[in-house]
Image (cartoon, helix red, strand yellow):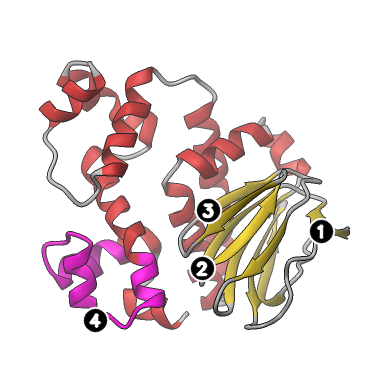
Amino acid sequence: MIALATGGSTGQILRSVEISGAIVTTVHYPTGECTHGEHYHENPHFCLLLRGADVEVRGGRSYDRGTGDTFFYHAGESHATRPRERSTMNALLELSWALLDGCGLSEAQLANAAKENLNAAFLMLKMQQELSNNDEHAPLAIEALVLELVNDSKACYQRTPPRWVRQVAELLSEHWNKRLTLAELSEAAGVHPVTISKHFRKYFSCTLGEYRRRLMVKHSFPLIRESRLTLSEIAYACAFADQSHFIRTFRQVTGFRPKDFRRF
């Protein structure tokens, strides 16, 4: 098994920056290159699949992963991956123990953030956008985004959310491209509409409308990166009003314009 030291990777590192207890990296795995060797990282880290698809083996189970999927790895957690069909590209965010201790944050909270917090993927994309800019302001911007993700993770998961929160999240995820009313959400979750409208931001770190648009953007990732659909066709497929609405929303939540994300 390969042990990866701080900042290490099994792929080709295209870009990397280290700032105040965190390392942000863009990693490329070329077509046909064997990347399934079992390995682990010294530090906990997030991984966002930027392009392509792969199969991961972790804890004795296999997982299919696609563009836009976000994962968290505990320090020392062994895993192995292999690309499917074509090359892949990952965004990595490695966090030092000093940073986690300073923020009073546990690995369990970060693991929940990767699984439950939709905004984690978008914050990592904004880090990648700043990393590609590579100007004098990028390190400061990346540091602010890292701390936003860390503190957002802590705020969301230092308390146990009520049952209705998960029920609402599941319904929104399942019907991400359909019209839903607050009455329908409240009926499914078994709570009053006022409860959802009053407390939604506390548990999701955004408004209900913002959350729905983020889901639509997330579903556009593989279409932008892996298909030949036009932006207008993608906008329609992802339930946006039109191409302008799609472009505006995509840039707002990711930092990229869709056409730049396609070329990234």
> How dense is the environment of label 1, judged by Cα within 10 Å: few (below 14), some, or many (20 and up)?
some
Of 162 and 94, which appears nearest the observer? 162
Give residue 15's position: percent from left, percent from top.
Answer: 65, 76
2 or 3: tag closer to the N-terminus: 2
Q: Give the range drawn in magenta.
A: 221-250
1 or 3: tag closer to the N-terminus: 1
Which amino acid, mark 1?
A: Thr
Of 88 and 206, which appears nearest the observer? 88
- Above or below, 218 against 85 in this view is above
Find out whether the residues at labels 2 and 4 contact each other: C-beta distance under 8 Å.
Answer: no
Residue at mark 4: 230
Distance from disc 4 to disc 3, alpha carbons, whole Å, reads 25 Å
Question: Between tags 1 and 3, which lies in front?
Answer: 3
On the picture, is 143 further left or further right than 191? right
Distance from disc 2 to disc 1, alpha carbons, whole Å, reads 21 Å
Distance from disc 1 to disc 3, alpha carbons, whole Å, reads 20 Å
> How dense is the environment of label 4, judged by Cα within 10 Å: few (below 14), some, or many (20 and up)?
few
Choose top left, top right, bottom left or bottom right for residue 246.
bottom left
Of 226 and 108, which appears nearest the observer? 226
Which amino acid, mark 4?
A: Thr
Which amino acid, mark 2?
A: Leu
Classified by dominant secondary structure, the portion drawn in magenta counts as helix
What residue is drawn where x is 42% and y is 46%?
A: 118
4 or 1: tag closer to the N-terminus: 1
